[in-house]
Amino acid sequence: MRKSLLALLLLAATGLVQAQVQLKEGHPERYTVVTGDTLWDISGKFLSQPWKWPEIWRANPQVHDPDLIYPGDVLTLTYIDGQPRITLNRAESRGTIKLSPRVRSSPVAEAIPSIPLGAINAFLLKNRIMDTPEQFDAAPYIVAGNGERVLSGIGDRIYARGYFDQEHVGYGIFRQGKTYIDPNTQEVLGINADEIGGGEIVASEGDIATLQLQRSTQEVRLGDRLFVSEEHAINSTFMPSAPATPLEGLIIDVPRGVTQIGVFDVVTLDRGRRDGLVEGNVLAIYKTGEHVRDRVSGQDVKIPDERAGELMVFRTYERLSYALVLHATRSLAVMDKVRNP
């Protein structure tokens, strides 16, 4: 009797695991990765819930960079102890590197990304989050333009005052943008910094630096702040995954200024590293239910929230995150909710 009960418990546990990872109807048994693929797309070919990819991924320790996937690799669906697994067969051409006088990309750069980088690269060049207002207040600022100009453009010399790192000559010029406030606690979550240009230091005297303005998207003004130019590259090879702990949050902004949100739009979330979010986390989006008047009772009634898509976090800050909408069944908007998928 005891053995029978144990067997039933084991069968139930096995069934639960199988229920947690649902293969997509019509999934392939083998798939050859091609240029232009993303890990999200490939996950969706095999799974009904692409964010559960880590549960079926079986990296081969004999393969160089087993966690990365490259064009030409063959992914095969197998079963181990009754559970579905995706195994990797590395394309032989990956082992040969032809040296030639050209700009070479690193092996990581050649791996397929988790999400379409074209949708976020331009965005990352123009946006930066500051955790506190003090970061802006402490940064060098434009104190004068050439010939006492108030506005400056490409090719002009500008003068900035403050502390400059002697090891860096390239600086981005930023203007303070939106201040993000927690709608419930009124806590300052961060400040969006909008890049409007950049230049290089050509001379300095005391705390005054002379810069040559090399690029700008709009006229540079007195008081604009300078920050050391940084690489905006992201870890593009993270795996899609659900957050490790229960999480609920809100879409609080669309940095590009639209009111309706759709697929491949970047959004700002009011949750970040302190809430347990990491790059690659997938969250379900819920359309906030409207308030309607019950014509029978005369009461104000809230319609239930409705699931309307998924997004993936690609950059985290202490209290905020940027995410890319990957799937939407209807138009989304600021203040829609996000939670574990």
Image: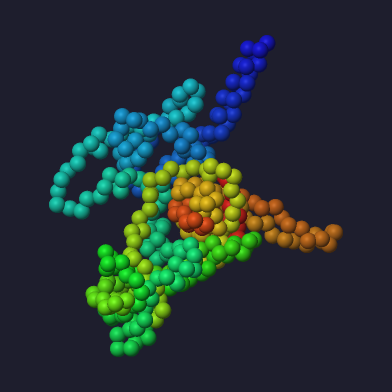
Quadrant hosting residue 62: top left
**Could you tell me which quadrant the C terminus lies in?**
top right
| 208, 232: nearer the viewer | 208
Residue 122 falls left or right of residue 50? left
Closer-to-camera residue (322/27): 322
- The location of residue 313, given as percent across then percent down, is 48, 51
**Where is residue 66, by image quadrant?**
top left
Q: Is residue 86 left or right of residue 145?
A: right
Residue drawn at x 43%, y 63% is 128
* Residue 238 percent coordinates (x, y): 41, 45
Specify the quadrant that holds the N terminus.
top right
Task: Give the answer, above or below, for where 22 lies relative to 152.
Answer: above
In the rendered image of this protein, does residue 174 appear above or below residue 268?
A: below
Name the residue: 47% across, 54% down.
Answer: 316
Query: Could you tell me residue 34's position as x and y percent?
Result: 33, 43
* Residue found 55% across the figure and 29% down from its top: 18
